[in-house]
Amino acid sequence: MDHSHMDHSGMDHGGHGGMPMPAMCNMNMLFTWDTTNLCIIFKWWHIRSTPGLLFSLLAVVALTAAYEALRAVSRRYETFAAKKAEETPRRNQVEVSKRAHVIKAALYAIQNFYAFMLMLLFMTYNGWVMLSVFVGGFIGYLMFGNNTSATKDGACH
């Protein structure tokens, strides 16, 4: 059947019912300062406005500083566990050491996961996000980095 003579102008072939397409996340593989359609790690963390950008950058600073807090908690627990093992009678030392080892392993796993999430933040290749990670690390170390060496361990090994 030949339909070439029919008027198709009233038909919507776009598939969206005339609705505008939502803005897609901009995925850069090169360094940029552009924040147009910037998504940070997740599709739902989509920057659409200047206030949204500022709030997100502050959140990145806070998340990065919190990573340093987690590192401080891990160091404190290791010190506590070592002291506890010394104070425990010989017959209970093995059990205390096993429990401490499991807790230290869990803290280590959380710390690794967290570090890789921070790496993904940095890998947005957005200068503003990268700068926020830097500022968060600086603030976090100022607040929680007492009695540690800055070169002890890197964020992503």
Image: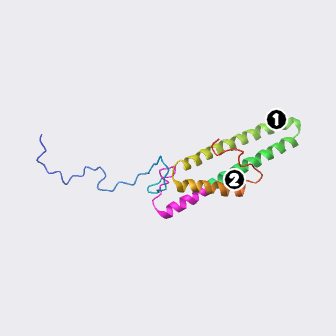
Q: Which residue is mark 1?
A: 94
Rendered position, 34 above or below 100: below
Q: Is residue 86 left or right of residue 9?
A: right
Looking at the picture, tell me which residue is in the foreground, 28 or 11: 28
Q: Nearer the viewer, mark 1 or mark 2?
A: 2
Q: Is residue 26 left or right of residue 149?
A: left
Q: Which residue is mark 2?
A: 69
Looking at the picture, tell me which residue is in the foreground, 146 or 90: 146
Amino acid type at circle 2 is Ala
How is the model colour-coded?
rainbow
Residue 36: x %, y % from top left: 44, 57
Q: Residues within 10 Å of mark 2 (few under 14, many from 20)?
A: some
Disc 1 is placed on an element classified as helix
Residue name at image x 73 percent, y 42 percent: 104
Looking at the picture, tell me which residue is in the foreground, 104 or 129: 129
Looking at the picture, tell me which residue is in the foreground, 45 or 99: 45
Amino acid type at circle 1 is Val
Q: Which residues are magenta?
A: 39-62
Residue 109: x %, y % from top left: 66, 41
Q: Are marks 1 and 2 in contact (CB under 8 Å)?
A: no
Residue name at image x 53 percent, y 47 percent: 123
Mark 1 or mark 2, which has the lower sequence index?
A: 2
Q: Residue furthest bottom?
A: 51
Residue name at image x 49 percent, y 56 percent: 33
Rendered position, 60 above or below 1: below
Q: Is residue 29 magenta?
A: no
Rendered position, 113 above or below 36: above
The mark found on residue 86 in the picture is none
Q: For residue 105, which quarter of the picture?
A: top right
Residue name at image x 64 percent, y 46 percent: 155
Disc 2 is placed on an element classified as helix
